[in-house]
Amino acid sequence: MVNPTHTYPPTTEPGPFNINRYARIGLHELSDGTFVNTSHGSPLPVFSHGEVFVHDGYAYHRDAYYASIDGGATINMLLRTPAINEVHLVAYSATVTGGPSILSLLENVTVSADGTLVAPYNLNRTSSNTSGVFISENPTVSGGILIERHLIPAGHKDGGLSPNTSAGWVLKPSEEYCIRLTNNDSSAISASVEIMFYEEP
């Protein structure tokens, strides 16, 4: 923790903190007024950007379990982004009992039925923040632009991106996305689908 009234580092850059210096030395102010280091080139303890958003209460998670997906069938999860708050999709994945299966991410889908609304969980369980992203299970969707897909071998877990990286899809505002799992096997499978994202306030 860094006190903003202290100097840093005192031997090379004396004086009080200011916002331009925060950026230069890789510091980020948390919502509680403390500072963490996000620069991997510094000897100070490092917080990843993802950890900062979790700490501040802007990172969310949602999963869904499907006991039986028929051979050749698909299941959909709809994400409708808000007009404000930039949404970063940092991870999505599926675990299947059989297979092979295809996990796809589609943008600008046409929605004819919303399905069942579900609420994402805040990763900071002490935060009262709520997500502006609309998420539903089993919507009726069609069309869209396929922007990523993954082959999941039988009995495996796979997906896009990683929750431990600063990379990810920055989603368009007021847009509709679909995460789709397709069972490419002739037999029914069980599966779970999960997503992780954060919103920049």
Image (tube, rainbow, N blue to C red):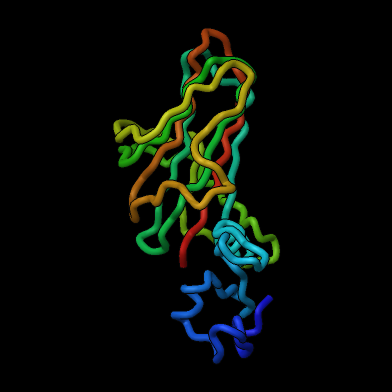
Q: Position of residue 196 (x, y in %)?
A: 55, 47
Left or right: residue 196 compared with residue 82: right
Quadrant for residue 95, please give it: top right
Residue 38 vs 183, above or below: the answer is: below
Tally of numbered discs: 0
Left or right: residue 109 compared with residue 180: left
Residue 30 vs 137, above or below: the answer is: below
Residue at the front extreme?
11
Q: Position of residue 72 (x, y in %)?
A: 47, 14
Residue at the top extreme?
186
Q: Position of residue 75 (x, y in %)?
A: 49, 28
Q: For the N terminus, give its image quadrant.
A: bottom right
Residue under the image location 48 percent in, 14 percent down: 184
Residue under the image location 57 percent in, 53 percent down: 60
Residue under the image location 47 percent in, 49 percent down: 167
Residue under the image location 39 percent in, 58 percent down: 82
Residue 85 vs 106, above or below: the answer is: below
Q: Is residue 129 visible?
A: no
Instruction: Work out whether residue 28 or residue 46 is closer to the camera in this orientation and state it.
Output: 46
Instruction: Work out whether residue 133 or residue 123 is closer to the camera in this orientation and state it.
Output: 123
Q: Is residue 120 visible?
A: yes
Instruction: Work out whether residue 173 or residue 200 is closer to the camera in this orientation and state it.
Output: 200
Q: Position of residue 16 (x, y in %)?
A: 55, 90
